Image (cartoon, coloured by chain):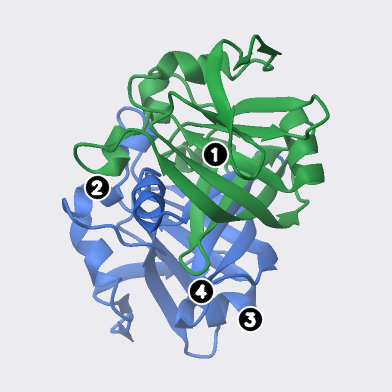
Chain colours: A green, B blue
Amino acid sequence: MNADAKKTVLRMIPYGIYVLTADDGKGNVAAATVNWVTQSAFGPPLVVVGVKADSGAYKIVQSTRKFVLNMLGKDQKGLAFTFFKPASVSEGKISGQPYHLAANGAPILTEAPGAIECSVTAIVEQGDHHVVVAEVTEAHLMKPPAGRPDNAILEMKDLGDTVFYGG
Amino acid sequence: MNADAKKTVLRMIPYGIYVLTADDGKGNVAAATVNWVTQSAFGPPLVVVGVKADSGAYKIVQSTRKFVLNMLGKDQKGLAFTFFKPASVSEGKISGQPYHLAANGAPILTEAPGAIECSVTAIVEQGDHHVVVAEVTEAHLMKPPAGRPDNAILEMKDLGDTVFYGG
């Protein structure tokens, strides 16, 4: 395989930036920046997320089968970097960010413009990140976008000219 | 579920535009515009595509387990609409577009800026589109991008202010 071509062509895929949150109800709360996300069906509404197989977030998602995907807004670049680091809960905040629990038990970041509650329907255990397929069971729109919704989300390219995080 | 919130929040996910091609070697060739694509692992390099379960492209991918994902360039909006329609091969072209066969037997659109050859590793048969997981076995970079690769690809938002195709 042409490794340089592989790297460049895979980097053509555009990504939004999300914070995946999960809570096992036993004191373990995860909030991790992810970008490998796509919808995969309309009926039922399914999404797919590539989740690092050795991460704390993955462990909680595996056991609870529930998570929330918080969309970050164009102006929330700082939050993307906050949640690249392991999250910690104190004084009712996750890594300093206010949140409340969704109906499915996972945290919703109050300041995110939108969030979807997800219920895992399948996991493909292949690769260093596993393929988590989940049904969208509820959606929350905290800040209705003025124009196209896909113009309101923080994107990988907004993080910096040389940032190509994956996972 | 709040249907309006679901629609808007899911539309926050940004998408590139791709042409998925496949050839069963028996005269059936598919070339279909898709956008539900994400990488899902670095090692091995895996991608996930949501493919319409009742489409001709899906039927060929199911049987051959091989396909090519052709990235479209910013200036190839016309091709996105060309491949929304069923493809036809004549005079050595697919729907008028020159192509050649990849090592895995699927067509590569010669004028695409980049393409990846994919070998299916799993299919999750859930929803109106199924989740096709595939390993990238080869990559082709026909037009090296001047800047960030994710600035060189045609995006959903480039197709028109009210275009929100899915699948």
Is B34 positioned to the left or the right of A69 in the image? left
Residue identifier under label 1: A69
Q: Residues within 10 Å of mark 4 (few under 14, many from 20)?
A: some
Callout 3 and callout 2 share a chain: yes
Which amino acid does the dot numbered 2 rest on?
A: Lys
Mark 4 and mark 2 lie on one chain; the one further toward the N terminus is 4
Callout 1 and callout 3 share a chain: no
Which amino acid does the dot numbered 4 rest on?
A: Asp
Which amino acid does the dot numbered 1 rest on?
A: Leu
**Point 36% across, 23% down: residue:** A158
Work out which residue is located at the far left of the displayed protein and give it.
Answer: B161
Is A135 positioned to the left or the right of B87 in the image? right
> Distance of mark 1 from mark 3, alpha carbons?
34 Å
> Distance of mark 1 from mark 2, alpha carbons?
22 Å
Residue identifier under label 2: B157
**For residue A94, above or below residue B134:** above
Tag 3–tag 2 contact (CB < 8 Å):
no
**For residue A34, above or below residue A99:** below
Residue B128, labelled with which disc? 4
Is B20 positioned to the left or the right of B97 in the image? right
B105 or A89, which is in the foreground?
A: A89
